[in-house]
Amino acid sequence: MANEPLIGDGAAGAAPVKDVTTANFMAEVVDASFDQPVIVDFWAPWCGPCKQLGPILERVVRAANGAVRMVKLNIDENPEIAQQMRIQSIPAVYAFKDGRPVDAFVGAVPESQVKQFVERLGGGRAGPSPVEEAVAMAKQAAQGGDHASASALYAQVLQHEPENPEAIGGLARAFIARGDLARARQALDHAPQELTGHAEIAAARSALDLAEQAQKAMGSAGKLRARLQQNEDDHEARFELATALFGSGERQAAIDELLVLFKRDREWNEQAARKQLVKFFEAMGPTDPLTVASRRRLSSLMFS
């Protein structure tokens, strides 16, 4: 299954996005909007928010499965159209239908708002794209422990959408699960700077950091336990043991050790126990039942 291409070349690969100029704006936007709604992204190379919004717009338009088209117009090279449209600031996004603008927004708005904009224009026809379906299948494979299939699916997604944050983070996690930390680091290092804060990529980075720490600590788990038997206040040993346990999949035991450490000395090493617990939670994901329960336990200790 993992080797079969699940994303057809004619679906996600052929992006319904193109650049337009003043010369072909009438044909590509105004005339074309009689056949299909057209979204116009007014942008410029110097515009930081444009670089944030552009990939989101393209991703959402591709996911609409042909319900809408999108074009990009560089206002530095084509100022006449922007002047006619009285565009004061960019990014500015206009929707054309039946030869005229019918909707618009200005600024780098959240992806949820972009989806609503596209769904309004496309008559609510936006459904899961082949890429989204492949990501969902990859997540399901990973949850079932089939990390080889998950990594193959995520790699397919990245061939079509190299900046898909869920696929970047998911591929890194699949490599981590297979013990290939070098390739996980490589996958994350290739993520664009503007995606650094995305939840999937941040979680994968935390998981990788923990895996690298655990790799160093796992060989000495026996010695760390012996140190704790001799001295229960050996905070460094407890911290390293928790990291090793987490890396070997004993998540509950790892969290228990850090909570004990936090209870004994919450300020040790600049609140290292709390910070490491936050990394655990980030790596496991906010909806994981163990994350939810352990956050409650940490909160009760913090405010007791």
Image (spheres, rainbow, N blue to C red):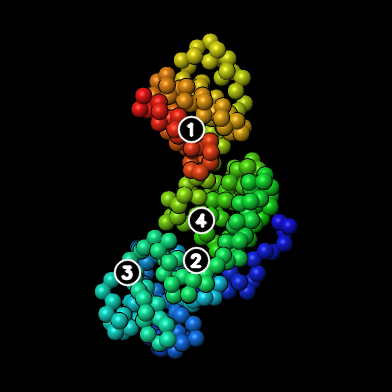
Quarter of the view holding residue 90: bottom left
Q: Earlier in the sequence, mark 3 or mark 4?
A: 3
x and y percent of residue 175 in the render?
62, 46
Give the residue pinned by disc 4. 165
Q: Give the Cα separation between the discs numbered 4 and 1.
A: 27 Å
Q: Earlier in the sequence, mark 3 or mark 2?
A: 2
Mark 1 Cα shell of 10 Å, populated few (<14), some (14-19), many (≥20) = some
Q: Is residue 76 above or below residue 153?
A: below
**Kind of residue at disc 4:** Pro
Q: Give the Cα separation between the discs numbered 2 and 4.
A: 11 Å
Q: Secondary structure at mark 3?
A: strand
Q: Give the Cα separation between the discs numbered 3 and 4.
A: 24 Å
**Kind of residue at disc 3:** Val
Give the residue pinned by disc 3. 106
Q: Residue at x 52, y 59 (%)?
A: 164
**Kind of residue at disc 1:** Ser
Q: Secondary structure at mark 2?
A: helix
Camera-near label (4 vs 1) is 1
Camera-near label (2 vs 1) is 1
x and y percent of residue 240 in the render?
52, 26
Asked if disc 2 and disc 4 are in contact, CB closer than 8 Å, the reply is no
Q: Is residue 212 above or below residue 236?
A: below
Q: Residue at x 48, y 43 (%)?
A: 286
Asked if disc 1 and disc 3 are in contact, CB closer than 8 Å, the reply is no
x and y percent of residue 259 in the render?
47, 25
Q: Secondary structure at mark 1?
A: helix
Q: Earlier in the sequence, mark 4 or mark 1?
A: 4
Q: Secondary structure at mark 4?
A: helix
Q: Which mark is residue 59?
A: 2
Give the residue pinned by disc 1. 294
Pick whichever, 78 or 166, lies toward us. Answer: 166
